[in-house]
Image (cartoon, rainbow, N blue to C red):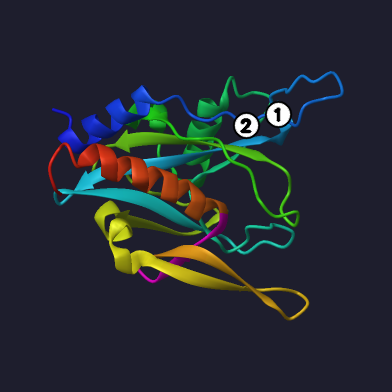
Amino acid sequence: MTDPRIAALEAALASRPPFRAVEPPSLLGVAKRPPPASRAAVALLLRIEGGAVELLLIRRAEREGDPWSGHMALPGGRWQPGDGDLAITAARETREEVGIDLWRHGRRLGELDELAPRSARIPSIVVSPFVYHVAPGAKVRPNHEVQEALWVRVDELLHPDAAIEYLHDLADGGTLSFPAYDARGQVVWGMTHRILAGFLELYAQSVSLAGPE
């Protein structure tokens, strides 16, 4: 039997089509979808453990030239020519990065809004987030791209104390302030924070109808 919180979230995702990113209008006035090569997908993996809904976060391995090196993130990556669609990209990257086969051991609940980086320092890319439910016993086996994998209770991320400020050091010696989440001592900011903020808002609205955790 499906947990009522998961069922409520699935229904909420189905009731609202995700926002679709488009390129700026051309000289002909026609806005186009971004080309596949500039697209990526991530997976929000949810499981029920000890009666609580948990979300999987990863810490990306330190790697020179990676703008997200060492950041807290979600499993995922860039679209590849062999991917039929972006949901396949999310599932493929999840299997590669954390060893969870979403085709066999997961159920797709829906898709969140597409988004793109707000900073010119970050490569131009459109990210599609997909939400999945996986079994409690799903084993996480990080590959070389993942330094750490961490299951975090969703109710902890929803707690007011989880909302913090992150100060990012700039190359010129200055700093920029960003909204962030404290995920069991790990700082989640940037695009991952934006994805989680949208997810948590929808989750809180839908799950309130299913009862507290």
Q: Is residue 137 visible?
A: no
Residue drawn where x is 52% and y is 26% of the image: 88
Which residue appears farthest toward the front when viewing the image? 29
Disc 1, SS: loop
Q: Nearer the viewer, residue 165 or 144?
A: 165
Residue drawn where x is 24% and y is 35% of the image: 6
Disc 2, SS: loop
Q: Nearer the viewer, residue 73 or 212?
A: 212
Q: Nearer the viewer, residue 182 or 118?
A: 118
Task: Using the image, determine if residue 43 lies above or below residue 20.
Answer: below
Q: Seen in the image, is 115 located left or right of residue 139?
A: right
Residue drawn where x is 38% and y is 71% of the image: 185
Residue 82 occupies quadrant: top right
Q: Seen in the image, is 145 located left or right of residue 175?
A: left
Q: Amino acid at mark 1?
A: Pro
The residue identified by callout 1 is 34
Write the start and end of the magenta stretch as one range.
184-190
Which residue appears farthest toward the bottom when viewing the image? 173
- Residue 191, image x and y in percent? 56, 51
Quarter of the image containing the N terminus? top left
Residue 114 occupies quadrant: top right
Task: Using the image, determine if residue 88 lies above or below residue 176.
Answer: above
Q: Is residue 56 visible?
A: yes
Task: Using the image, determine if residue 9 lies above or below residue 59.
Answer: above
Q: Amino acid at mark 2?
A: Ala
Q: Is residue 188 magenta?
A: yes
Q: Nearer the viewer, residue 16 or 50?
A: 16
Q: Is residue 125 magenta?
A: no
User: Distance between the Cα atoms at labels 1 and 2?
Assistant: 7 Å
Mark 1: few/some/many CA within 10 Å (<14, 14-19, 20+): some
The residue identified by callout 2 is 21
